[in-house]
Amino acid sequence: KAIAGQPMQLAAVPLEQGAGAANYLWTFSDGQSATGQQVSVTFPVAGMYSAAIATTDDRGATAVAQISFHVDQR
């Protein structure tokens, strides 16, 4: 459960075995961004947010996924 003002952990899970990801870039609807397969992000205000992750593998192929979620008030 995401709570305003508290860190939220997100992780990308590869769908294909054997394709090593070289880069993970997360962007969030409030303007934040982060890099890495696992990230921690804090949303200061309750509300609906979305996150997009662009993954580039070691062969140069890129995939993008997006999720939406609600952050609750404390």
Image: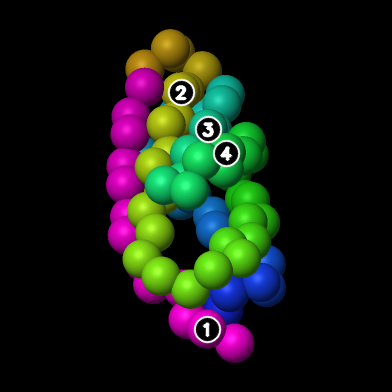
Mark closer to the chain start, 3 or 1 = 3
Which mark's residue is nearer the viewer, 1 or 4?
Answer: 1
Residue located beneath label 3 in the image: 25
Q: CA distance from mark 2 to mark 1?
A: 34 Å
Give the percent coordinates (x, y) of residue 1: 50, 81
Q: Which residues are magenta?
A: 62-74
Amino acid at pointer 2: Thr
Amino acid type of the residue that numbered disc 4 sits on in the rendered structure: Ser
Q: Position of residue 63 (x, y in %)?
A: 33, 29
Marks 3, 1: nearer the viewer:
1
User: Residue at left 32%, top 60%?
Assistant: 68
Answer with left or right where residue 67 lies relative to residue 8: left
Alpha-carbon neighbours of circle 2 within 10 Å: few (<14), some, or many (≥20)?
Answer: some
- At numbered mark 1, what does the secondary structure look like: helix, strand or loop? loop
Q: Main secondary structure of the magenta part?
A: strand
Q: Could you tell which of marks 4 and 2 lies nearer the N-terminus?
A: 4
Amino acid under label 3?
Answer: Leu
Provide the secondary structure element on which disc 2 rests: strand
Q: Is residue 20 above or below residue 4?
A: above
Chain-order first, disc 1 or disc 4:
4
Lower position in the chain sequence, tag 3 or tag 4: 3
How many numbered marks, from 0 up?
4
- The residue labelled by disc 1 is 73
Q: Nearer the viewer, residue 19 or 61?
A: 61
Q: Residue at x 46, y 23 (%)?
A: 56
Locate residue 19: give its quadrant.
top left
Q: Which residue is mark 4?
A: 33
What residue is disc 2 on?
A: 56
